[in-house]
Image: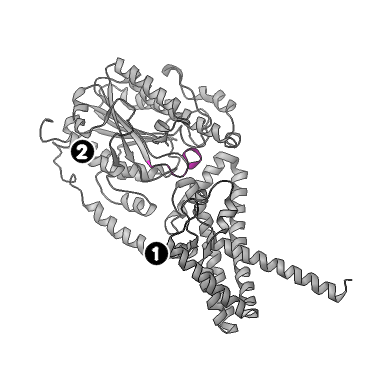
Amino acid sequence: MLPVSVSKHVRRIGGAVVTTFAAVLVFLALVMPDQITRLPPGNFWGTALVRVPIEGLLVAALLLALPARARRITATVLGVVLGVLTVLKIIDIAFFAVLARAFDPVLDWALFKDGFNFLVDSVGRGGAIGVAVAGVLLAVATMAAMFFSVRRLSRLLPAHPRLVRGGVVTLSAAWVTLAVMGFQLVGGIPVASQAAADLARDTVLAVPQDIQDRKDFAREVQDDAFRDLPQGQLLSALRGKDVIIGFVESYGRDAVENPAFNQPVVEKLRSGQQALEAKGFHGRSGYLTSPTFGGGSWLAHSTFLSGLWIDNENRYRSLVSTDRLTLTSAFGKAGFRTVGFEPGVTFAWPEGQFYGYQQIYDSHTLGYQGPALSWSTMPDQYVMKKVHDYEFGKAGRPRLLAEVTLTSSHTPWTPVPQMLPWDEIGDGSVYGPTAAAAESPQKLFADGKKVKRAYAGSVAYSIDTLLSYVQEYGDDNLVLVLLGDHQPASVVVGTNSTKDVPISIVAKDPKVLDRIAPWGWTDGLTPAPDAPLWPMNEFRDKFLTAYSPQGEPH
């Protein structure tokens, strides 16, 4: 048994250690930015620690001024609030790392399911469950740690009132000076920190902002110049044509312009363009700015097809409950048969009725008997073969509009199938060896350079599939609209990339491309760096204007 004096000394040291730990936790919770990638590599902690949090100074002054009972109650409330804000900041860090935006505490909870599914594809179901459990435990532990830390520090303030007051006054003066000077760390992070206050403000304001956005969106839906366009005029310049809208998953601007990994995509666009031109097809290309980044393909699809900016779940759910004219329903109104090929749909999809599809082919109705290729239920070339077998290859059919969502370039970019002769695809069983020999997502994601190469290879495959289809089955009346839905995750392109995606229109009939000559798009399938860039929601109206003319183009 230790002597009393030694025991007191040990307790005193232990108490000092606990207090220091509590102070560091609270300090970091207040000053850490929600975009840690903005901090310079190799000096993460040094840079993070050189900040003065105004919230901590104000709270210290407040607690010191309160009587004991009020101080305990206030510290309890502030501890809970700081715990919640710290958890939200951790979630923000993850969202910025993957989606290059902050977490919306009102609208984004549905995305956690998609994140879990991504983890299942990347590390297996057991690993995904482990990560989810660890995340929940981390959130609980963080909140508990903040609660107890604030409470402990609040009890110590009255023991040294003069020291606390002097420190608060001195640091407050320093904060004001730094704020007026606008002094910043590397990465644009201000030394005079108010990160916690900003996060609290943004979180509280998210609710009324989302409510107002819902009201604004209801008005936007009703504002549609094409709603009452006469059927005889709607898309009249495409009468007699067949149109395929091909979305290539994660086909972003970096796939074309980033020299670190763009070579497979650029080469495939170049060789595909040459092969198409040999058969009389030509293309023009530009860029669109997607409403999403790294995921959320349905937001991009709905934006492109509806002509409205759909950048959150609230807008998406509101949109699909309306009768908004979409590109697909416009084709249906103009007399085309409208079909959707959606291999990524593995469950009931009532949104298909909103888009105006007369027939939807999903993962259950495409007849695929081969292995799933990670997240992608089937290879893109198999899907395009069924586009021909089920619709375009039928005799005596009506003119068609097919929207095809290609998924082979979806994360985790392994396995990536190879192109096969079109008559050897069969029921998809031929892809068994490809799946069996593929590198696991866990192994692939351990090497950042390999991930980028795999991503580029998957996009090149998807593009090859569409262009090869046109070469194999395209006739004089086929029109292809090829575009990406969003950039890939930041593990490939970083967090400072644009949200731009390439888009191309390919046709054999020169009159089709003459209609869009005023757009100023680049000739060919590779848009120039200075090619026109539009928000994705503007495409619907521009397309309907170009192909629903009062007369011939000038």
Q: Where is residue 496 in the image (x, y as percent from the top left)?
A: 44, 44
Task: Classify the position of the C terminus by image quarter.
Answer: top left
Position of residue 522 in the picture relative to residue 141 (left or right): left
Residue pictured at 52% horizontal, 65% vertical = 53
Q: In the rendered structure, which segment of residues is drawn in magenta? A: 490-499
Between the residue at mark 2 and the residue at mark 1, the CA separation in whole angstroms equals 38 Å
Q: In this view, does 116 lie above or below 71?
A: above
Mark seen at residue 205: 1
Q: In this view, does 421 lie above or below 62?
A: above
Reply yes or no: does residue 315 show up in magenta. no
SS state under label 2: helix
Main secondary structure type of the part rendered in magenta: loop
Amino acid type shown at disc 1:
Leu
Q: Is residue 488 above or below residue 242?
A: below
- Residue at label 2? 544
Between 165 and 259, the residue placed more toward the observer is 165
Q: In which quarter of the image is residue 391?
A: top left
Q: Is residue 412 in view from this perspective?
A: yes
Position of residue 103 in the picture relative to residue 24 (left or right): left
